[in-house]
């Protein structure tokens, strides 16, 4: 029992929160300012952060988004335009 407790304490930092972060690359197909979301050409919707400057993005722009998945909602933490 003591070994299980020690292993749990040693391995816990490797699994805490890291499994939910991801990134996606694609072309913006929809921008919905009312819902504060964008949709990429992969068909998935991503929630933009509050106070987002919508003049920085446009439909058809190729981007890489870094997001956190919480309760099946993809919250964008970073968005960058790509050349490709």
Image (tube, rainbow, N blue to C red):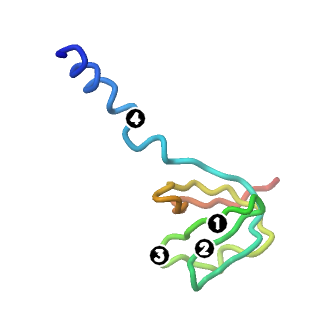
Cα separation between marks 1 and 4? 26 Å
Residue 58 placement, left or right of 9:
right
Q: Which of marks 1 and 4 is nearer the N terminus?
A: 4
Tell me, yes or no, whether the two marked residues, 1 and 4, touch with CB atoms within 8 Å. no
Q: Is residue 12 above or below residue 57?
A: above
Q: Which mark is residue 50?
A: 3
Residue at (68, 77) in percent of width and height? 31
- Residue 51, position as x, y percentages in the image: 48, 79
Q: Is mark 1 on a helix, strand or loop?
A: strand
Q: Earlier in the sequence, mark 3 or mark 1?
A: 1
- How many residues crowd around disc 2 within 10 Å: few (fewer than 14), some, or many (20 or more)? some
| Closer mark to the observer between disc 3 and disc 1 | 1
Give the residue number, with chain letter if any, for mark 2.
37
Residue 43 placement, left or right of 34:
right
Which image quarter holds the N terminus? top left
Give the residue number, with chain letter if any, for mark 1.
45
Q: Is mark 4 on a helix, strand or loop?
A: helix
Tell me, yes or no, whether the two marked residues, 1 and 2, touch with CB atoms within 8 Å. yes
| Closer mark to the observer between disc 3 and disc 4 | 4
């Amino acid at each position: 029992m003591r070994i299980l407790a020690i292993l749990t304490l040693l391995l816990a930092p490797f699994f805490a929160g890291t499994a939910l972060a991801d990134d996606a690359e694609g072309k913006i197909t929809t921008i919905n300012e009312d819902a504060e979301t964008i949709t990429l050409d992969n068909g998935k919707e991503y929630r933009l952060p509050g106070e987002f400057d919508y003049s920085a993005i446009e439909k058809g722009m190729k981007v890489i988004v870094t997001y956190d998945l919480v309760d099946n909602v993809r919250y964008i933490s970073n968005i960058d335009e790509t050349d490709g």
